Amino acid sequence: MINRLACTLTNYIRSNSDFTNSDDLEKINYAIETILNEAFKIIILLTLFSILGKLRYFNFSMIILLSIRIFSGGLHSKTFLGCLLWTTLLFIATSIVAPIIPKISIGIYYLISLFNLSVIITKSPYPNPYRPIKSKKRRQVLKVLAVFFAIFWTIVLLFFTNDICYLNCGIFTILLQSLQLLYVKKGVFI
């Protein structure tokens, strides 16, 4: 359904614009498909976590994840359903399970954060294999932004978050993102 809608929109663009190059139209179609898939996935997740009464943890986790993942990359699924399943499991872990974990030693939070930052510094960026990073400068910019947001959220969580539920939600969101970067290999899909 989403593929057909993306093709329809791409054909409309082809008919009503100066885009005639098949490579450009293929990129436009891919971008439209991606936007539609993400919008549909977010609507499903917002509905699910709203029904479960965990929308505020979901939103908090999503803001942290997106601000890092956009620049660091990570695992990608072969199908929309696979992506939806893995994303739902990730947010269940960060938005339902993590907030009920009792407070652990501050030293453990520091160790997890050090691990997270080390992984993001050494492994990012790792983009979708369909959109490789061709420029060394772009790779450096993405790495700097991924590290910046990881450090920013780590500081906010460790030094300015008094609510243990949000602390756990945030720390575990960054941890799961970091673990994805450890797992990825060139061209790997789940």
Image (tube, rainbow, N blue to C red):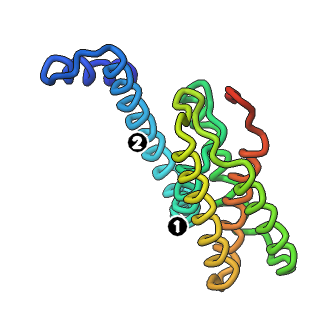
Residue type, label 1: Arg
> In the picture shown, does residue 78 fall above or below 75?
above
Q: Earlier in the sequence, mark 2 or mark 1?
A: 2
Horizontally, is 40 left or right of 85 in the view?
left
Q: Residues within 10 Å of mark 1 (few under 14, many from 20)?
A: some
To which quarter of the image does residue 184 belong? top right
Work out which quarter of the rendered image holds the C terminus and state it: top right
Residue in view at x 33 percent, y 22 percent: 24
Quarter of the picture containing the N terminus is top left
- Dot 1 corresponds to which residue? 56
> Looking at the image, can residue 1 be seen?
no
Eyeballing the image, is 166 above or below 177?
below
Q: Nearer the viewer, mark 2 or mark 1?
A: 2
Residue visible at 64% across and 73% down in the picture: 166
Q: Are marks 2 and 1 in contact (CB under 8 Å)?
A: no
Q: Quadrant of residue 144?
A: bottom right
Three-letter amino acid code of the residue under disc 2 = Ala
Helix or strand or loop: what does disc 2 sit on? helix
For label 2, the crowd category at 10 Å Cα-Cα, with few meaning under 14, some 14 to 19 and many 20 or more, is: few
From the top left corner, tell me how far across and down residue 60 is, in percent.
54, 65
Q: How many marks?
A: 2
**Label 2 vs label 1: CA separation?**
19 Å
Residue 79 position in % (x across, y down): 57, 25
Disc ID at residue 39: 2
Residue 89 picture quarter: top right
x, y (%) of residue 28?
33, 27
